[in-house]
Amino acid sequence: AQLMNRPADVTRSTVQKAVVVIADSPQSFGMLRERLSIVTQAWFAQREFTDTEILRRFQESLADEKARGLVKEETERDQHLGMSLREFIHEFKWQALVLLKCCLLQPKMLFFGSRCDRLCMVQFSLISLIPGLIRNLQDCADPDLDS
């Protein structure tokens, strides 16, 4: 697909763009991921990257929902949206239990992967096996941060 309005700084036939949301808590990760997917598809479909109205409205809606406290309500309901524990177990089989034990017993774990979204989903799926951990990750970094 061709860009509707090709700026002078676009010199290649392929344009790589990314839309990123930086959130202060992972609790609404699944919901954000689904909504961001829709917004990103709409923004790319318009083939006009200088028109950021869609992105601006999305950002405003997120800020408005957070200000009104709607994010917390959706978090309780959809905290596991987008996490596939079945896929996690299918991929790691018996090693899923080893990973869970490691998560419980080791102070640090290193995850490596080439696809960021997949890597994050593996991490979130793993920690979702520990009851209440996703809702309280802000307390995990240091005992002094316990809220």
Image (cartoon, grey):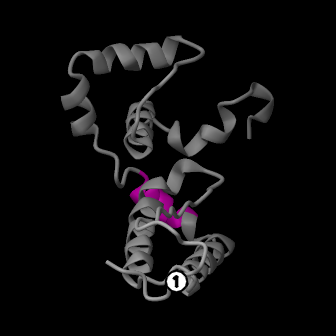
Q: Based on the displayed image, in which of its 4 quarters is residue 65 positioned? A: bottom right
Q: Based on the displayed image, in which of its 4 quarters is residue 36 positioned? A: bottom left
Question: Per the image, is 73 magenta?
Answer: yes
Q: Based on the displayed image, in which of its 4 quarters is residue 53 positioned? A: bottom right
The total of numbered circles placed on residues is 1
The quarter in which the N terminus is drawn is bottom left
Residue that carries the numbered disc 1 in the rendered image: 54
Residue at coordinates 81% horizontally, 29% vertically from top-left?
144
Other-residue count near label 1 (Cα within 10 Å), few / some / many at <14 / 14–19 / ≥20: some
As drawn, 66 above or below 33? below
- The part of the chain drawn in magenta is 72-79
The kind of residue tagged 1 is Ile
Q: Nearer the viewer, residue 114 or 96?
A: 114
Question: Per the image, is 108 magenta?
Answer: no
- Please tell me whether the stretch drawn in magenta is mainly helix, strand or loop: helix
Q: Secondary structure at mark 1?
A: helix
Q: Nearer the viewer, residue 9 or 56?
A: 9
How far across and how far down the image is residue 73, in percent? 52, 65
As drawn, 37 above or below 3? above
Residue at coordinates 49% horizontally, 88% vertically from top-left?
5
